[in-house]
Amino acid sequence: MRHYMVLLLLFMAAISLEAKMPQNGMHHQMFQSVPAEQATLLQQGDAKMFCPQCGMNLPMFYKTNHAEEVDGKVKQYCSIHCLVEDMEKNHKKPVNIRVVDVTTLKFIPVEKAFYVVGSNVKGTMSMTSKYAFATKEAAERFAKEHGGRVTDFKGAYEEAKKDFAADAAMIGKKQAMMAKKGEMLYAKKCRPTDKKFASPAEAKAYVMKNGLCKGLNPKQLQAVGLFLSRR
């Protein structure tokens, strides 16, 4: 129960921080975040700013971003949690999996990355943080300062799988609550649409591109995106 409550508080804090984040993606004081102009977006399309799984803003969680290619299409995730969710659910074998190096902010192949798992720096979508570095020396310095253990991608992936059920339960409950709020916001502030959406990211991009809703802050936009993708 204590683990669940801590996870819920972390997720609520992340949503709250996104709500305070200006629409132009300016920097605020969360470790994962970078200004939008410093983030490399590898995926294409109107929804490229958002995680295809959860819909969260990618620059806001940039230092835990992962990317993969499936059938020639690049998908970029806010976290290893969302990468694991997509890979385990779809049972497809991606190629060219990459992760952001915390030090340089550049994407590197996961095979060459050194992960620090379980540091005291807050993670993304998980109680157990996972940050990647291009060199073992950088990972060890981070672990010495912040705690945690140094491992490879396989170790980090297995840790994410181990925590997945608890993390997903917490996130799912919170997202269900937000979707209910999104339904009310949609009825009050948005023009109706019959379009179907495969993900919150796709819904958010459509709302923004078409000016479907008026006066939504980022937290409200996330709520509407969750509702539209689930209805």
Image (tube, rainbow, N blue to C red):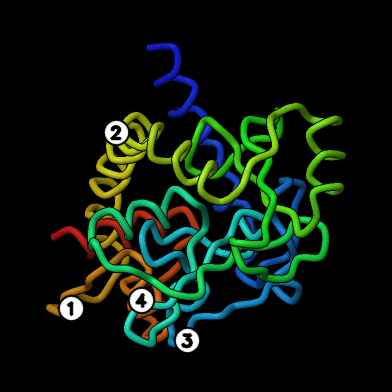
The answer to which image quadrant residue 226 occupies is: bottom left
The tag earlier along the polypeptide, 4 or 2, is 2
Q: Earlier in the sequence, mark 2 or mark 1?
A: 2
Location of residue 35 in the rendering, given as x and y in whole percent from the top left corner: 74, 66
Looking at the picture, tell me which residue is in the foreground, 1 or 200.
1
Tell me, yes or no, whether the two marked residues, 4 and 3, touch with CB atoms within 8 Å: no
Q: CA distance from mark 2 to mark 3?
A: 30 Å
Indicate which disc, 3 or 1, sits on the residue closer to the N terminus.
3
Q: Nearer the viewer, residue 160 or 31?
A: 160
Mark 4 or mark 2, whichever is nearer to me: 2
Mark 2, residue position = 169
> Marks 2/1: CA distance?
30 Å
* Label 4 Cα crowd, 10 Å radius (few <14 / some 14-19 / many 20+): many
Q: Quadrant of residue 51?
A: bottom left
The disc at residue 193 is: 1
The kind of secondary structure element at disc 3 is loop
Circle number at residue 44 = 3
Of the two numbered discs 4 and 3 in the rendering, the one whose residue sits closer to the viewer = 3
Q: Which residue is mark 4?
A: 207
Which residue is found at the position 51% from the left and 75% from the top? 96
Q: CA distance from mark 4 to mark 2?
A: 27 Å
